[in-house]
Amino acid sequence: MTPGPRHHARNPRGLPATVLASSLRVLALVLLPLLVLNLLLGFGNHWPTLWPRLEWRFSAELAVLVVALAAWVGWRGRAGRLLAGLSMLGTAWVVLHYINVTVPSIFGRRLNAYWDGQHLWAVLRMSGEGAAGGAYLRLALSLLLAMVAVGLLYAIVRLCLQGLAHAAEHTAPRRTLLGLGALGCALWAAQPWQGEVLRPLIAPPVSSLLAEQSRLLSLALSRSAHGEQLGPSPAFAGDVDALEGSDVLIVFAEAYGAVTLDKPDIAEPLAASRARLAAGIAASGRHVVSARLISPTFGGASWLAHGSLLAGIDTRDPGDYPLLLTTRRPTLVSHFAANGYHTVVWTPGIQRAWPEGAFYGFHRIADADRIGYLGPHFGFWRIPDQASMALIHHQEFGKRFPAREGPQQAGAGNAQDGAKGGAEDAADDAAVIAGEAAVRIRLATYHPDRARPSDADAASMAAAMAASVDASPASLAERIEAARASRERRPRLVVFPTVTTHAPFRAIAPFTDDWSRLLGHDAYSADELAAAEGVPVRWSDPTPAYLAAMRYQFDWLADYLGQHAPADLFTIIVGDHQPIGSVTGPGQPWDVPIHIVSHDRSLLARFEAAGFVPGLVPPDTPLGPMHDVTPLLIEAFRRGS
């Protein structure tokens, strides 16, 4: 007679041997899927690269998933269609965890998906055009590999969850899963009482990231919330007579952060360049005072710093900036314009329409296509900072550089070249006049009592004025001379956000002591361009390129301020933000240096009284947030302050 189930051999505990073997096998299968899933949800970032790093932390969210899956299978007997949904959710969770640990490491700040997502394509273009040839092909291959990786990740997650679901069909493994999951949930809940011990053991939860992004999205879409957050503007009142009609240059030095002073591996390689800048300032008879400010941004979003300083508004919340642009609040730009200054923003980094610029009320907006740069393009940012400064000096300060004698400049060909250059200057002046006509119509209506013309009306008026410029050579010549005379009579406020020190910090044009060369087509030779673009972009190790870009920035500033700048030029050099986190390292403050350079000691003394110190090395303690310096500038520029 065939024996029934009760006649199977039993172990000492009374369980059938086949049942025990099956249970041990299922328990073994439970541990491997849990380990794999926990690794996928607990890894960290291998700074300063994009690669993950193995970290032994447990995921509280995995514990919740295990409890839910085990309870569901215990109730329904099998996972069924739930398995596919959980696999897709688990894959998305792993990808979000990667973003959650990588973005703060690389960029030095938390993700803001609503605002950062709007610039994703620009970042991809910058990554492609800032590298050597074939970069777009490599970018396409990287995206393809990313899709393959996500597909492989889905397969791994589904296999692990399938193993857990199968194990949960048996009583003992299901109880084990419920116990392990409950223990993980309890440890996560105990953090408020044992945070110092438990927090390093728990992976950062993705749910917190999603909750934070939901909050930020709600704020971004809620104008009423922003209206409550946007603080009062400074009192833009009084004169700027303490400047005595000096031209004012505000240089927003891209990615010039306090890391250049605080981190020895960055500060020491830049010490010689900083010393040359100090020597150049001193040799010109100027003096410099410095301080630290807290930037409203880190690693990017430079416009938040620009708006903070120029408008005197706290823009740490990115949503406050677009709201600010919808207002008619006064700015340093409108303040200078009201006091007789011709205001200019020199933005070689703007390569598209910039309607936001209308808020500031600049008389002239000189973007990448309107500054008159004729030389070759260097990488994504196209126009080297030294060339931009040369064009400002020539077009806005009305100065000319002494030509350097060289093989191409000697001989009888100079007269012909000079005639050609004169024709090009005339054409450039004509373009400036026509452009400024449109700019004035569109932008000089910052006063709250004036109605801003529509786009169609502005375009029609600009076309009519441009046509009048081209009416006749005589009329054109008269307008050029009138415009030049007008520019000479009115002092300048020039705001210049630099670009060469922007990530990925390549390609870097060579510094040249022949500034006059930078105004023409032969600004740089083909060999110089090839050498600059031949240096590869390395996002995983950008520090050497950052150091090279910062040396370049110190060098052209030192030479310009030491040799060429107008004697009475009042210069403000302020970092817009720290460089990206892959340069700074984790946990760096948001501090940036600010330097004020002038020949007027009495004017600089006003800033020293507010906490600035002589020299290029500011105190370790920041004065405060960037927008706090705006009322200080207003007060310092007022006569009799």
Image (cartoon, rainbow, N blue to C red):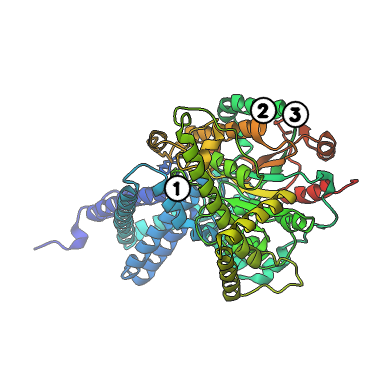
Residue 636 position, x and y percent, is 83, 45
* Numbered circles on residues, count: 3
Q: Which residue is mark 3?
A: 285
Q: Earlier in the sequence, mark 1 or mark 3?
A: 3
Circle 3: is it few (<14), some (14-19), or many (20+) Cα within 10 Å? Answer: few
Q: CA distance from mark 1 to mark 3?
A: 37 Å
Please determine whether, in this image, residue 458 is positioned above or below residue 428: below
What is the three-letter code of the residue carrying label 3?
Answer: Gly
Disc nearer the start of the sequence (2/3): 2
Check disc 1 and report the residue beneath it. 380
Q: Are marks 1 and 3 in contact (CB under 8 Å)?
A: no
Please state the horizontal and vertical placement of residue 638, each as a whole percent of the image: 85, 49
- In the rendered view, tell whether residue 488 sits above or below residue 465: above
Q: Quadrant of residue 46?
A: top left
**Position of residue 398 measured from the top left corner of the image (x, y, whole percent):** 65, 44
Which is more toward the observer, 406 or 607?
A: 406
